Amino acid sequence: MSKQKALYWWRNDLRIDDHPGLNHAVENSDSLFHVFFWKDEWDEPNPIGIPRMSVRRKAILFSAIEALQAQLRNHNSELIVLKGSFEHSVNELFAEHHFDMIYAQEGILSEEKEEERYLGKKAPIKLYDGNSLVHPQDIPFDIKDLPDVFSVFRKKVEKLSSIQASVNAPDHFPPSPKTELNSFKFEHELKSDPRSSFPFFGDELTALSRVKNYLWETDAIASYKQTRNGLIGIQYSSKFSVFLALGSISARRIYSELKSYENEKVKNSSTYWMYFELLWRDYFRNAARKYGDLLFCSGGIKYPSKKFLQNHKVFEKWCLGMTGDDFVDANMKELQATGFMSNRGRQNVASYLVHDLGIDWRWGAWWFEHYLLDYDPHSNWGNWMYIAQVGNDPREGRKFNTEHQANQYDPELSYRNLWLNE
């Protein structure tokens, strides 16, 4: 079979390890053009009037892109970053090049699907899922039959599903064709606040190093279930979520390392809990496949919903950490300063916005989209719906008592003093 001139379209899969789509592109191409579309749409205001992506989010994304560019150059390949509206950049690329095939990581939500349709008009396109733990085809039911309760999904998947083995990076790449197109460079430096719980870059080598450190070098994984509700420092939780969101590591690679750790060192409730949370991530991805844009509706998947307030002054105080609730305020200030917040903090600030202030939960989700370094649409919107009781939650009354939570998880005020005493 003759090989071809192909395009690899990079999205949230910024790695060469455990990358089935990239492997297929490499195996079936004589030449392979690599492109990432840096979209002007990210600067457009969302419904609460702020850009969809903060400068810090862009900086960590570009740190992953730059590292990938360096890896590909070492393999006689080049990654071009095209800046502009998505359609303009696609048209600019295809005005200069013809491709026999396009390879890409598959999107889930409507905006991603629309991009795939537009690009697919230019050349045949093959899409792959390399970011799930359990491949969608291995889930033991049709997506329309996805249970609306996570525990039901988890038990069925644990009992009936297999996890595909991770695959190694290609050992060689086809050369990239020459181009006159200019590659965009993001000029803002990624600076870390010294108090940050995520002082890392977003690239693949950093991701693999973090997995090695958290599992093999420090054995922090062995006590993860006990420490995961921490608030300060890099070791209370894995911090894998940023790398997973960027696609600089795969869930299957983390799982593979986790199973090796269990076989060679210890298997306990903490190692299981890491697997448990990877399944939660999968569950939200599959819920997005089932429900689509209902994720962004006021009533979520339980429409019609109760009425939420849209009070800009009250919302702004929450955003800026000026509510008067010191635990909420400390977490919101951490988010603004670093782009990161603990899972315990996220649950508390979300509950406070929705249940104490009565504000539309989607406003909080849009604020998180702007700031979170580990922003992932499926998990972000799924978790916000969960807290707002319009999502995948069988229980009613999921309201957090922030004073009790602060006393339990920050009894000596260490966290609040860190972020409020500036």
Image (cartoon, rainbow, N blue to C red):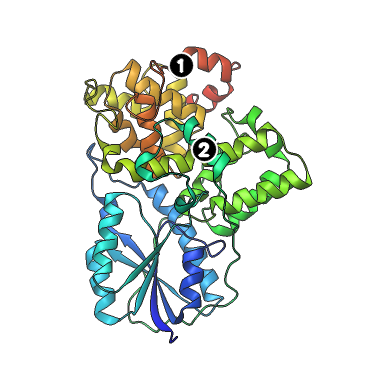
**Could you tell me how far apart the alpha carbons at marks 1 and 2 are, in whole angstroms?**
34 Å
Query: Which residue bears the numbered disc 1?
Result: 402
Query: Which residue bears the numbered disc 2?
Result: 156
Residue 50 image offset from top left, x and y in percent: 26, 41
Viewer-closest of 186 and 309: 309
User: Which comes before the other along the chain, label 1 or label 2?
Assistant: 2
Residue 33 image offset from top left, x and y in percent: 40, 76
Write the residue at 45% across / 14% down.
401
In the image, which is nearer the foreground, mark 1 or mark 2? 2
Write the residue at 22% across / 39% down.
47
Specify the quadrant of the image occupied by residue 114.
bottom left
Query: Does residue 349 appear left or right of residue 43 in this picture?
Result: right
Q: Is residue 149 visible?
A: yes
User: Around disc 1, counting alpha carbons within 10 Å, would you say few (fewer than 14), some (14 to 19), or many (20 or more)?
Assistant: many
Write the residue at 30% across / 65% down.
83
Give the vertical position of 345 relative to 73 (above or below). Answer: above
On-image quarter of the N terminus: bottom left
Residue 163 image offset from top left, x and y in percent: 57, 51
The amino acid sitting under disc 1 is Thr
Q: Is residue 422 visible?
A: no
Give the vertical position of 24 relative to 379 (above or below). Answer: below
Specify the quadrant of the image occupied by residue 237.
top right
Q: Under tag 1, what secondary structure?
A: helix
Viewer-closest of 408 and 303: 303
Q: Under tag 2, what secondary structure?
A: helix
Give the vertical position of 94 relative to 247 (above or below). Answer: below
